Image: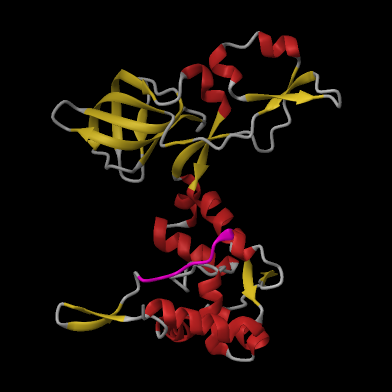
Amino acid sequence: MGNKEGYVVMSFYFNKFPNIEYSNNVCVNIFTRPSLTNSAKSETSVYYPYTLKDGERADHLANHYYEDASYSWLLYFCNDIVDPYYEWYLSDEEFNDKMVKKYGSLEKSKQKILYYQVAWYNNESFLSEAGYSALTPQLKKYWTPLLTENGRVRGYERARINWVVETNFIQQLHYTPDVEPVVDEIITQTNSNNVVVATGTVAHIDTSNRVVSVQHVSGEFITTLNARGETANIEIDSIGERYYNIPLDELVYWEPQYAYDVEDSINQARRTVYVMDRSYIPQVEKELESLFNG
């Protein structure tokens, strides 16, 4: 979506909003914004899902379906979109441009961990009843029973739970700097064969005591190798305390979620939009005007 086209057609949407006085100026009250419920969107006689083509903007779709590009506001409304530039489906080129602007580069967006999530998806592991019984109580929560037609347990599969935590654990490292690290920088240790030994994201730096706390840790930091980042170069003098956010024996059930993958998943979901049947437009416009004007 081009900047100019997106914001021009969005202006029709905001024309529906009431005005308020703010700092002696008359402004559009964008906080008075109704939205559709999921149950309303499921009314197939009123709304239907539409899969966007590559590069298809809201004004394109509005012009094609409603024969009026200005009804792009209705598409934004039906899909709870406030920012037409980044909340509408982005092409691969537009999406990559967004990643570069937001994270500095595509590579950084693919390296940056946003959070950890239980990794049940794409996991077809199966446990027998004996295998399940052998688990500790803390691990049994990651499994759910598979039942026969008669309701008897025939085994266990991974439970479809979507728990999220900020990080796996935090590792403190006592260091001597060649070049000081900075917060949010990824530091890595590699051996003489250029194989990564450990990596983590700098969460906090205590320069007085020369202690750096790293999160999103993979591998084990050691004292015989320097840790380097985009700018940092530090010698690890000793390994400090470790604070687990996920218990050690449960780490295998979790996976890091990278910025590129998370945002790509969101973008792909936006490819399917809800389109309102054109026969309902007069009714919607009347109800919105009544709602906004009290």
Q: Which residue is drawn at 58% across and 22% down?
A: 141
Displayed quadrant of residue 26:
bottom left
State left or right for residue 192 relative to residue 153.
left
Q: Can residue 189 be seen in this view?
A: no
Q: Residue shown at 65%/8% (left/top)?
A: 134
The magenta segment? 32-38
Is 225 placed left or right of 145 in the picture? left
Residue 123 image point, x, y percent: 69, 33
Q: Which residue is drawn at 30% across and 24% down?
A: 172
Q: In this view, does 252 lie above or below 92?
A: above
Residue pictured at 50% horizontal, 84% vertical: 286
44 or 176: nearer the eye? 44
- Residues 86 and 202: in front is 86
Residue 247 is inside the magenta segment: no
Give the image location of residue 244, x and y in percent: 39, 22
On whether residue 34 falls in the magenta region, the answer is: yes
What is the total number of numbered labels drawn onto the structure image? 0
Q: Which x, y percent locates residue 216?
A: 42, 34
Instruction: Locate the C terminus and report the quarter of the image it occupies.
Output: bottom left
Q: In which quarter of the image is residue 147?
A: top right
Q: In which quarter of the image is residue 113?
A: top left
Left or right position of 43 against 172: right
